[in-house]
Amino acid sequence: MNTHKLKQYTFAIFCAITTCFQTSCTQNFEEYNRNPTALTPEQMLGDNVLMGEKIKGISPVLVQGHQNDSQIIEQMVASEYGGYISCVNPWGNSGNFYTYNPRIGWIGITFEKIMSQIYTSFFKIKEETGGKGIVYAWAQIMRVAGSLKLSDTYGPIPYSKVSKENLTSSYDSMEELYNQMFSDLQEAIDVISISVSAGEDFTSLKDFDYFYQGDFKRWVKFANTLKLRMAMRLANVKPELAQQKGEEALTHTIGVMTETGDAAWSSFNDGMNPFYRSAYTWNGGECVVSANLSSYLQGYEDPRLTKYINEPENGSTGYAGVRNGIKQSQGTFAAYQKWAKPRIGQDDKQLVMSAAEAYFLRAEYALRWGKGNAREYYEKGVEISMSERGATIGNYLKSAKTPASYKDPINPLHNADAVTKVCPKYNESAQIEENLERIMIQKWLASFPNGWEAWVDFRRTGYPKRFPIVNNLSSEGVSSERGMRRLPYPESERNTNRKNYDAALVLLGGADKGTTELWWAKKN
């Protein structure tokens, strides 16, 4: 992300949310996502396509496709904190996410961008549909998914009281938020399920669906899997509710994802895959593979190794990644950027949710509450993941291999011993905690490079274990081992929504810092 692009990005993002609904900030976003060959509004009236256009405005909340949005939200936050990639550009060293001292101007971007993406279009859809029908239900699924991502990052957020007229609303506690999101998601699942069962024709919406090309049965599977994902967030703090909501998702007539074709991949970008752009085209490459990922894949001799990682560009052999959190200089940047990078192609789609994840969620559910066979779900998840990535599984599920120790390609002071001895082979006689770690490791490997779920799992379970960051520059006492627990709210909330911001800190139950635990992570 060069300086010119950063300035452009900062200008676009730091329009306050209220301004976004009134000025060219919102107008530009919608225009950017508009199909240049789309029909005129007059031509589209009466067949749901006009509202399909608005769906495109919400779609990036599932995974950001614009280059700058992706880098600062998906890569610098989610994939960095999820342990998949390591950012190596110093960006002036005036504060970086990867050294746990993110600059003030960056910490609120995820909040402001996703809130704008959700509500710019959502209220228009709600108004034009009367809050009914398949398009509104579709928008609700995306609203819930985007709001979950926001809450995963910050904690309590505005949700139930947000309206077109009241954008700077009060926040919901995380418990209230989950209750409302479960309700909204279930309503959407019910509406779309009825339409799918009735054999309704969704052809008019196909071209506006970046993920499933108008296959709404798969949208129901996505929504049920999202519900199961949300349920497992609550396993430690609301186990009875987690069981109930998980059971609802699993016993639904259409159910959760079960096969490779159910995975959600986004085709939206602004010319090329944004991970490819930042890893290979910007300043010689601004991100590489994390040492965490290379340690597990190399030690396990994992068949996905060559599907996830390219060998170094400097001609050396091996797939060594780079430790997270190294305070970079221009010299180290030039050196580290030549090492192992994510194997992502220019035209590759972006992963939103893998079908394998559904099996690992089911494995965790079974492990905790004895409903179903955890081993079978675990092994099926690994098999599906291999299939999703075009890898041959071989004897992987019988493997007793463990993660590899790490040798830094440049500085031996960064070398580190392996962080765990857990292997891919399932051990039914092991303690629950060992198999929970095993499940979380494979769930993490299956979700590369989408780091949101990985960051959540690390905070709520402590798995997969990872190397501590090298240079911890936090002024708030963030632990190098446990990592950033959340991001502080944006300055715009403190400055323009102060009363509600102050009340949100009471709901958060701690200071507006990166050390404060979120509700579902307090027991880890």
Image (cartoon, grey):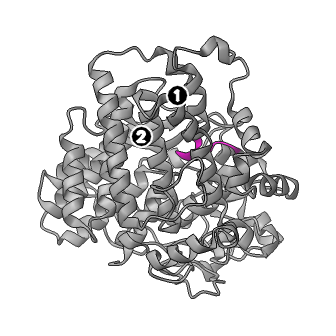
| Residue range (magenta) | 59-66
Label placed on residue 209: 1
Label placed on residue 454: none
- In the picture provided, is 147 more to the left or to the right than 5? left
Q: In x, y percent, where is residue 486?
A: 52, 72
| Overall secondary structure of the magenta section | loop
Q: Amino acid at mark 1?
A: Asp
* Residue 16 in sight from this viewpoint: yes
Task: Count neighbours of disc 2 (C-alpha within 10 A) and say few if under 14, some if 14 to 19, many if 20 or more.
Answer: some
Q: In x, y percent, where is residue 7?
A: 84, 57
- In the picture provided, is 174 more to the left or to the right than 309? left
Q: Quadrant of residue 411?
A: bottom right
Q: Measuring 41% from the left and 50% from the top, which residue is drawn there?
A: 446
**Residue found at the very far front of the displayed protein:** 165
Q: Give the answer, above or below, for where 35 lies relative to 91.
A: above
The number of numbered discs placed on residues in the rendered structure image is 2
Q: In x, y percent, where is residue 161?
A: 48, 56
Spatial distance from mark 1 to mark 2, Cα to Cα? 28 Å
Query: In the rendered image, which residue does mark 2 sit on?
Result: 391
